[in-house]
Amino acid sequence: MRRGYLTAAVLGALWMVVLSVTVAVTMSFATGDAFRPSLSFSLLWGGLVGMALIHKNRVRTMQILMASWLLTSGLYGWGALQFGEDTTPAASTIGTLTLAAIFVVSLTKILEEIAPGQLTRHEFEHAVIRFLTGFGYIFFTAIVLIPFYVMLMTSLKNQAELMQNPLDFSVDLSKGTDLLRSYEELFTQFNFDTYLMNSFFISVLTVFITLAFAIPGAYAVARLRFRGQAAFSRSILLIYMVPMIVLALPIYIAFSMTGLRNSFWGIVMIYPVTTIPVALYMLQGYFRGLPSEIEEAGLMDGLSRLAVIWKITLPLSLPALASVSLYVFMIAWNEFLLAFMLLDDPSKFTLTRGIASLNSSEIPRQHLMAGSVIATVPIMALFLGLERFMTKGLTAGSVKG
């Protein structure tokens, strides 16, 4: 067999397996019907279609193959997708046609440089890279979206539906606003508005305290010369070598003895301990990338060192400050261990601590999922809205000048 046919068959077979699994999972979640991929038929049809796509008369060959595939799928169950006994004909038809369309279009793109004859190294590597790129997009998208989808759909159900079929992640849109009952009860019966405000207040204070310590510390490491500077710069992140669970008992004892346990100010004091090192590390790398000549010109014009930092360095560092602030905010917003250990009063719970209180046999499971959605959506929206600033800030200090 020629190398071009072999490459097309192998990539086509593997790509069909990837897409059949993806479509089966998607259709199962969307409809509640039983879809499952057939690995043997996926390999068979994927290999045949892959070779057909690089055939000289590929249009005619593809028409015959696709017609055979759809016919045998519907009549004999020889397709890449297998259906349960209760699967409706409409759902099985949609699943099969969706898989066929996506597979042909995407595989055509993957194999666009593959010819029936011998391949060059460039042609072979490009085809493999396209396959791996598509697989990566699907894999990492599934990792992110599937848990969130399951969480969201579960939060929209009632207890009777969950008891009837916990694995049915479809939703009945005819219920209207009744779908949001769990969210309404969280705010009216479980004080989630208080948890949201507490988390926002603590996260914002953590950002300000972290920047207040990290900016001068990072500037000193990046610009000033003092004994032990190199050792300090290399050891900034050593604190993360000690797991927080190891420090939990000493922190609990110390905060209990000083009266800081179960208080906002205790949480606000301990959160920056976990965020200042990473903020120091990120900012000192950015400050080193700024041209020192600009600051020297300011010093020659009579500005003090603090004035140079305030009027020159910080305005030039706004992308880095934005990315560090967002990162610190996300850490404080999602922190659970310290909040769970130090907070006992429900009126002072953070959002993560409040969600943990829902994990009880006495509270319906959909309330826990609704609380998780409430905690996820704001930080997700904030990240997506400021992602370009975060990316710019994280990469701007990587090149000097």
Image (cartoon, rainbow, N blue to C red):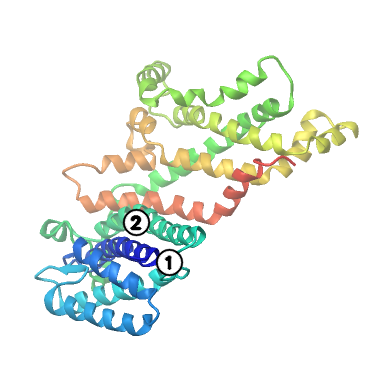
User: Mark 2 and 1 residues: CB-CB less than 8 Å, in contact?
Assistant: no
Q: Position of residue 12 (x, y in %)?
A: 33, 65
Q: Nearer the viewer, residue 18 or 154?
A: 18
Which corner quadrant of the image does residue 317 belong to? top right
Q: Residue furthest left?
A: 85
- What residue appears at the point 62 percent right and 49 percent down from the top-left corner? 392
Mark 2 secondary-structure assignment = helix
- What residue appears at the point 34 percent right and 70 percent down from the top-left corner? 50
Q: Nearer the viewer, residue 260 or 42?
A: 42
Image quadrant where one finds the C terminus: top right
Residue 32 left/right relative to 14? left
Q: Position of residue 311 (x, y in %)?
A: 78, 39
Which corner quadrant of the image does residue 52 belong to? bottom left
Number of marks drawn: 2
Q: Is 225 placed above or below 29 here?
A: above
Mark 1 secondary-structure assignment = helix
Q: Amino acid at mark 1?
A: Ile
Q: Which residue is mark 1?
A: 110
Q: Is 70 placed above or below 377 here?
A: below
First reached walking from the N terminus: tag 2 or tag 1 = 1
Residue 303 left/right relative to 401? right
Q: Nearer the viewer, residue 223 or 76?
A: 76
Residue 26 left/right relative to 125? left
Q: Residues within 10 Å of mark 2 (few under 14, many from 20)?
A: some
Q: Which mark is residue 142?
A: 2
Q: Amino acid at mark 2?
A: Ala
Image quadrant where one finds the N terminus: bottom left
